[in-house]
Every structure is written in structure tokens, then in C-alpha cells.
């Protein structure tokens, strides 16, 4: 019998076939669409005006700025092309936008070529990212680090 594609069909399309390529590109394109939709919303609904977004629960309960505080204002400024204001609102988030774009671009190219996206980072890198976020959080809550506060 052989299945819907004829004798010998294994259930996976050949790498060069258009249907296989479309299927491989669906996830990265879908992720980009979701991120673009979220950025479009934040770009159209100004987080600098109160009442549109909830207050950070950590900030509200403790008065401590988390690493994400200012992220919506950063995204809003970034969308409107004001990189300086985006960095002032949340420097880590702004760097994250560029990092996301680079990883997404790599993902798209590898999906196009039929290669899986495998980014194997040693645990020391994950610990390093955690340390940077912790240091950023502590410094932005100290008097001398007020430039990092939104």
C-alpha cells in the first residue's frame, strides 16, 4: 500500500520539497507573528500612560525593581525608533530584542535549509546569564545605579 504519497512513503517529506519547507518554516514564522503582534500592541498602547497595563507585582509589594521593570516602556520606545529611551527604560530588555532577532534569523535560515536549531550552551553560560540579571537587578535598586532604573 505505501501511504498517501505512494509506495515507500515514510511519512516525512523530502527535504527539498516545498511542503516540507513550509512545514519547517511554520514555527519560526508563527513565533515572529506572535512577537510582532505583541510589539504592535505595545507600540499602539503607550505604557507611559497609567491604567493600560498592570503594575509589576514585585514593585507594588516590595518597592524593588525586577529585571523586567520598564520592559514595556522599553519596547514602546524601541518600536518608535527611540533607542536611547529604550535603553534608559530597560537596558537588558533592549539587548534582548537584538538577541532575539539574531537567534530568530539563525532559526529561520536553518529551518529553510532543513537543519534543526540546536544551540547548546554549557551550564556556565546559563549561570552567567543568571548572574548578569541578578547584578542588573541589584545595581538598579541601589542609589548609585539609579541610571538603570526606569
Image (spheres, grey):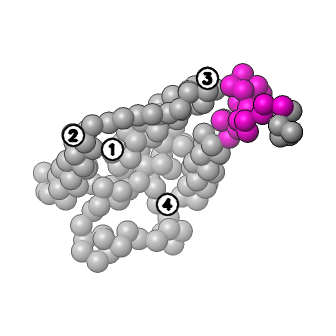
Residue drawn at x 50%, y 64% as measured from the top left: 49
Dot 2 or dot 3: first in sequence order is: 3
Closer to the eye: label 2 or 1: 2
Marks 1 and 3: which is nearer the front? 3
Q: Of helix, strand and loop, which one carries label 4?
A: loop
Dividing the picture into quadrants, the one containing residue 46 is bottom right
- How much space separates mark 2 and mark 1, taking CA atoms? 22 Å
Q: Which residue is mark 3?
A: 113
Report the residue marked by disc 2: 124
What residue is at 50 percent from the left and 33 percent from the top? 117
Residue name at image x 59 percent, y 46 percent = 31
- Residue 93, compared with residue 137, is above or below; it is above
* Residue 98 in view, yes or no: no
Residue at the disc numbered 1 = 91
| Location of residue 142 (image quadrant) | bottom left
Looking at marks 4 and 3 on the same chain, the residue that comes earlier in the sequence is marked by: 4
User: In front of the other: label 2 or label 4?
Assistant: 2
Instruction: Give the residue number, with chain letter if any, for mark 4.
Output: 47
Label 1 Cα crowd, 10 Å radius (few <14 / some 14-19 / many 20+): many
- Which quadrant of the rendered structure holds the N terminus? top right
Range drawn in magenta: 7-26
Q: Residue 44 lies in what quarter of the image?
A: bottom right
Instruction: Please give left or right for residue 91 compared with residue 53 in the image.
Output: left
Q: Earlier in the sequence, mark 1 or mark 3?
A: 1
The mark lying in front, picked from 4 and 3, is 3
Amino acid at each position: 500500500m505505501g501511504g498517501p504519497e505512494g509506495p515507500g512513503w515514510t511519512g516525512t517529506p523530502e527535504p527539498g520539497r516545498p511542503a516540507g519547507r513550509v512545514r519547517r518554516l511554520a514555527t519560526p514564522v508563527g513565533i515572529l507573528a506572535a512577537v510582532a503582534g505583541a510589539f504592535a500592541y505595545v507600540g499602539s498602547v503607550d505604557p507611559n500612560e497609567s491604567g493600560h497595563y498592570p503594575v509589576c507585582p514585585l514593585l507594588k509589594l516590595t518597592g524593588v525593581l525586577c529585571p523586567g521593570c520598564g520592559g514595556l516602556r522599553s519596547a514602546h520606545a524601541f518600536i518608535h525608533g527611540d533607542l536611547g529611551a529604550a535603553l534608559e527604560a530597560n537596558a537588558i530588555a533592549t539587548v534582548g530584542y537584538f538577541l532575539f532577532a539574531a537567534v530568530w534569523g539563525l532559526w529561520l535560515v536553518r529551518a529553510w535549509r532543513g537543519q534543526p536549531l540546536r544551540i547548546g550552551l554549557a551550564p556556565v553560560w546559563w549561570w552567567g546569564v543568571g548572574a548578569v540579571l541578578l547584578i542588573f537587578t541589584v545595581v538598579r535598586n541601589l542609589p548609585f545605579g539609579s541610571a538603570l532604573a526606569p
